[in-house]
Every structure is written in C-alpha cells, then in structure tokens.
Amino acid sequence: MSLETEIKTFAREVGFDVAAIGRADPYLRARRVLESRRTKGHYPAFTEPDIALRCDPKRLLPSARSVIALGVSYRTAHRPRATRAGRDPKGQLSRYAWGQDYHPIVRSRMQSVIEFLERRVPDLEAQAFVDTGPPVDREVAAEAGLGWYGKNACLYVPGYGSWVFLGEIFTNVELRPDPPVSLDCGDCNRCIRACPTGAIIEPFHVDPNRCVSHLTQMGGSIPKELRPAMGLKVFGCDVCQEVCPWNRDAIVADRPEFQPLPEVGTAPSLIGMLTMSKGEFQRRFGPTAAAWRGKKTLQRNAAIALGNSRNPAAVPALAKAVCTDPKPVVRGSAAWALGRIGGNEAYAALLQARERETDPGVLQEIEDALQQIRHATNTPAPPPPPEAPSPLPRAGG
Ligand code: B12
C-alpha cells in the first residue's frame, strides 16, 4: 500500500470522512481574491490580516512539500425546528453548532494523523490547522482535490455536500498529489436568490458584512436595517446550504459527536437564552461552537430573534432585559425587539427603561422603538417621564 493510501485509510480510522493530498505551493487565487476583497472592504473578520502568510504554506512551515486536506461531515438526520408561535418561541441554531465544538475534535484527529506519519517517516515536520489558523481552509481543500466551490463559496465534498468541517496538515513529506474535483453549480443560483440579506453579491463572493452568519457572531450592535432579515437565527446561518440541491441528497454521516446536545437541541428557547445565567450559558452552549463570542452575543441575538418572532409572549422577558440587563448591547436589542412587537405593555416597558437608562446608544434604541410603536398605532408622543422612581433596579454597565 502506498503511503498516500495508508494516510487516507488511517485518517478514516480516526474519524475523518475524506482526505486528499496537495502540493505545498502558494495559493495564488486566494491571494488575488483576498487582496481584491480587502480593497472592497470585504476582508473577512476574525482572520489573519497578513495575506502572504495566509497564502504560502512555506511561510508557516518552511520545509513544507505537501498538504493533507481533511474533512469530517457534521450532517445529522435532524431538521431545524424553530418556531415563532406559542408561549416559548424557539430560535434557529445553525447545524455546525448543534453538537460538540469541532475545533478540538478535528485538531486531535489531525494530531493522530501526524503521530501516524511520525512512525512512518524519519525527521517528519508537520503543522496542523483548523479554522483559527492563517490558512484559507477551503482553498487548501479545493487545491488538494478534496472538493469544489459552490456559488455560496462553500467547499463541497463529493457525496457529503458542504456539511463538512475542514482542516489541513502541512508537512515536509513528498506525497503524490490528487487531481482536482471538476464539478460546479451549473446554472443553479438558488443560494444567491435565497440569501436573506443578499450577501452573495456574485457567484463565489460573500459580502461578510451582510452574511447573517457574520451578523450573529460580530461584536456590538447589529446594523438595524439587517436585523429583520435575521429571522429567528441565533447563531450562524444555513440558508445558502439548506436550499442547495447538492446538499439535499448528501450522505447523512450521523456522527455521534455532532448530534444535537440535549441541553440546547436544534432550536433553543429564545426566552431561555435571553434570561440565562453565566452558569447556564456555560453548561448549555459551552461545549458547542456557538460559545466562542460569549453569553452577551447569544443574548443579543435571542433578543433580536424574539423581536422578529413578533410574539407578545416575549414582552415580559424583554421588558426585564431592557431595564435590568447589565450589557448595553442586550438592553438596546431588547428595546428594538419591544418596538417590533409593539403593544401597550411593550410601550410601557420602554417608557420605564427610558427613565433609568444612561447609555446614549441604548437611549437612542429606546427612542426609536417608542417611535415605531407610536407610528404603528398612530399614537401621539406621551408626556415626559414621571419623577417617581421606578420599582425596578437600575441597569448597570
Ligand atoms: C472568516 C470566516 C467566516 C466569515 C466570512 C466567510 C466568507 N465567505 O468570507 C463568516 C462569519 C461570514 C463565516 C460564515 C460561515 N462559515 Co466560516 N470561516 C471563516 C474562516 C475563519 C476564514 C474564511 C476566509 O478567510 N475566507 C477568505 C475568503 C476570500 O474566501 P471565500 O469567501 O471562501 O472565497 C473563496 C472562494 O469564493 C474562491 N473563489 C473566488 N472566486 C472564485 C471563482 C471561481 C470560478 C471559483 C471556482 C472559486 C472562487 O476563492 C476564494 C478564496 O479561497 C474559515 C476558516 C479558515 N481559516 O479558512 C471558516 C470556514 C470557511 N467557515 C466554515 C463554515 C462552516 C461557515 C458557515 C457554514 C457557518 C454557518 N453555518 O453559519 C458560514 C458559511 C457562510 C458562507 N456562505 O461562506 C467552514 C466551511 C466549510 C466548508 N465546507 O465550506 C470553514 C472552512 C471552517 C472550517 N475549518 O471548517 N465564516
């Protein structure tokens, strides 16, 4: 058996679904694309700013000769079950955050592959990356022949679709490269049409500033004009992948590690998320890929999703959040949600919050929400806030 075949067989044994081998040559297309995205203000957040470092394996491992691209499918048989109705509306968590966080899983499996290679190859040098490293994982995978690019920019693996986490090992071993995968989307544009914010501005080009996945992960306040399009999404977005015909028939790998965790499921309670304690956040979301931006980000997203649910059952929880949550971004998003749901109870809560609020950004959110309700009900502006202190505690932070 050739070393290449041995590596691929071993990779499957340790829990990868696919493996392919490429040359450790510079990624010229990725370099060109990243430079052009930077000039358009579309350089992806959360990534290494040094483009040359991202696109040259030898900058990361000077002795690099080959790349082993690896993928593991996270597709399970479950279907998302978000719902805006009822006493307890449910948000939509994207598939990649249903099960255990893939980062340590992929990293430790790649470490096993490196240890396997160490037993075969004297003086092995190897560096492994998944997601958070400088390399552009999809480009490494595409160049190694692991898969091909869909118009939504996702990397599709034959048989498995795009529901695949990617990682790569750069190594000094000279390995025979695999041929590229020559598939494409043909004239299908479903992902482009379905994107809720129009973020796929042309095939293979996602504007990260509009992508709902990015909106759910960004820090601070989400741009107002994009909030309605987020619907019930609380972390990540799968729309461009869900509508894809290649994904419809993809293999359901159903790996145990990516089954929805019982503490969260596929559609967590939005009120539960908005009101969760630090301990609850850690217990429920801590083991998933949805935790890395912290509790406040998920609570902000839950508030926006509750606003988009337009469900009056959410008003008491939002009213409490707008008055008492210690984080301005959560109070501001709760104010927006109350304005979107509307009604007397929401209006009264906003008036009460306005009395105690000191943060200018949150005050603006409250004013806008009050105006939205007045506008919706054709009500004139109310009298100035009363002098008497409210029984609710003052918001801090
Ligand atoms: C930053 C980032 C994001 C950002 C920005 C994404 C973006 N498209 O720019 C945000 C937060 C929005 C995001 C969202 C998601 N992400 Co993300 N993300 C990353 C990260 C960390 C860096 C990506 C990057 O720098 N891209 C650079 C840009 C320029 O690349 P690109 O947009 O993919 O463009 C390429 C193609 O379009 C292609 N191309 C350009 N023109 C042309 C023309 C032709 C003809 C062809 C064929 C190709 C082509 O070349 C470009 C460069 O390689 C990677 C991990 C990593 N280190 O690479 C994960 C990664 C890409 N993300 C991943 C996942 C799972 C997601 C989500 C599905 C999560 C979710 N459910 O919400 C979404 C998918 C959104 C989408 N449609 O892209 C996986 C993707 C797995 C896969 N099979 O594709 C990765 C690889 C993480 C991993 N290791 O598994 N992500």
Image: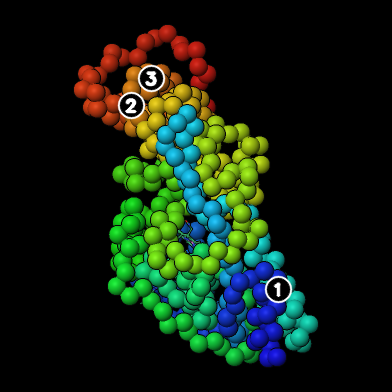
Q: Is residue 139 above or below residue 173?
A: above
Horizontal arrangement in the rendering, residue 54 relative to residue 36 (left or right): right
Q: What residue is drawn where x is 45% and y is 11%? A: 389
Q: Amino acid at mark 1?
A: Glu
Determine contact: label 1, label 3, CB under 8 Å.
no
Mark 1 lies on a secondary structure that is helix
* Sequence-first disc among 1 and 3: 1
Determine contact: label 3, label 2, CB under 8 Å.
no
Of 242 and 166, nearer the camera is 242
Which numbered disc covers residue 342?
Answer: 2
Q: Amino acid at mark 2?
A: Gly
**Disc 3 crowd, CA 10 A, few/some/many (<14, 14-19, 20+):** some
Residue that carries the numbered disc 3 in the rendered image: 345
Q: What residue is drawn where x is 49% and y is 75%? A: 158
Which label lies toward us, 1 or 3?
1
Alpha-carbon distance for marks 1 and 3? 58 Å
Cβ of mark 2 under 8 Å from ligand 1: the answer is no
Of 6 and 363, nearer the camera is 6
* Residue 115 can be seen, yes or no: yes
Of 310 and 339, nearer the camera is 310
Q: Amino acid at mark 3?
A: Glu
